[in-house]
Image: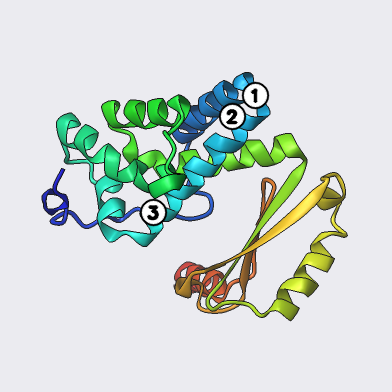
Amino acid sequence: MSFSLVRTYAPTTGFGRRAASGIAFKYANATYSAALAKSPQVLTKVQAELNAISKSIADSPDLKTFVTNPTLSVKDRNAGLPALYARAEGTGAKKEPLSDITRNLFVLLSENGRLGETAGVIEGFNELVAKHKGELNVTVTSAAPLGKDVLSRLETTLKQSQTAQQAKSLKLTNKVNPSVLGGLIVDFGEKTIDLSVSSRINKLNNLLQQSV
């Protein structure tokens, strides 16, 4: 498939935390259950493949446009899938076939017109795997990258929370989103702590509108 077919469409859906919809989670749960039923090794392989595909989408504007373009026909969507698989399969001597589970997932997403749910499916899958392993994934979103000392202090503080103490391990990820303007947004488990400047501005705007 030529990606010139999809360049005219400008995607509005971003890839990030809290992307998972109810539909995406159904696909994620089905994929997770199928992989786990095979073996822990298959679960690990599928997760690695999905994360490689996620990185490919993040790195390639063409791939991002491809998965988020709802105007493509089923034929064009299916024709574009090999490009989506490429990084997950590797190259040269390290190249190995994509698992049937990952391949079947994307065939279903393509045929059902749900490739736009890819980010949410992968996010939901990773959350299920983390829960299975007793891991707590914490995402800290900031306007600019945080220093190691700041992340270390955040990790120390978060480990004292009741949610973290129930987990076997804690994994902290810093995501950069200039739209938060300043401050932090912390996502962990089912909780979100919004300490961003943009959130404060929105609250102020709401108060001003109510007082007019």
Instruction: Indicate how the structure is coloured in the image.
Output: rainbow
Q: Foreground mark, 3 or 1?
A: 1
Position of residue 169 in the picture relative to residue 4 (left or right) = right
| Residue 123 image offset from top left, x and y in percent | 53, 44
Going by the image, does 187 lie left or right of 80?
right
Q: Amino acid at mark 1?
A: Ser
For image coordinates 51% across by 72% down, the residue present is 180
Judged from this view, the residue extending furthest toward the front is 93
Residue pointed to by mark 3: 56
Tell me the element at label 2. Answer: helix
Q: Which residue is mark 1?
A: 39
Density class for disc 2 (Cα within 10 Å; few <14, some 14-19, many ≥20) is some
Distance between the Cα atoms at labels 3 and 2? 21 Å
Q: Quadrant of the N terminus?
A: top left
Instruction: Determine the residue positioned at 35% across, 53% down.
Output: 13
Q: CA distance from mark 2 to mark 1?
A: 5 Å
* Identity of the residue drawn at 62% across and 41% down: 127
Residue 30, image x and y in percent?
A: 52, 24
Position of residue 2 measured from the top left corner of the image (x, y, whole percent): 13, 48
Q: Which mark is residue 171?
A: none
Amino acid type assigned to the residue bearing label 3 in the image = Ser
Q: Residue under circle 2?
A: 42
Q: Farthest residue toward the top?
A: 37
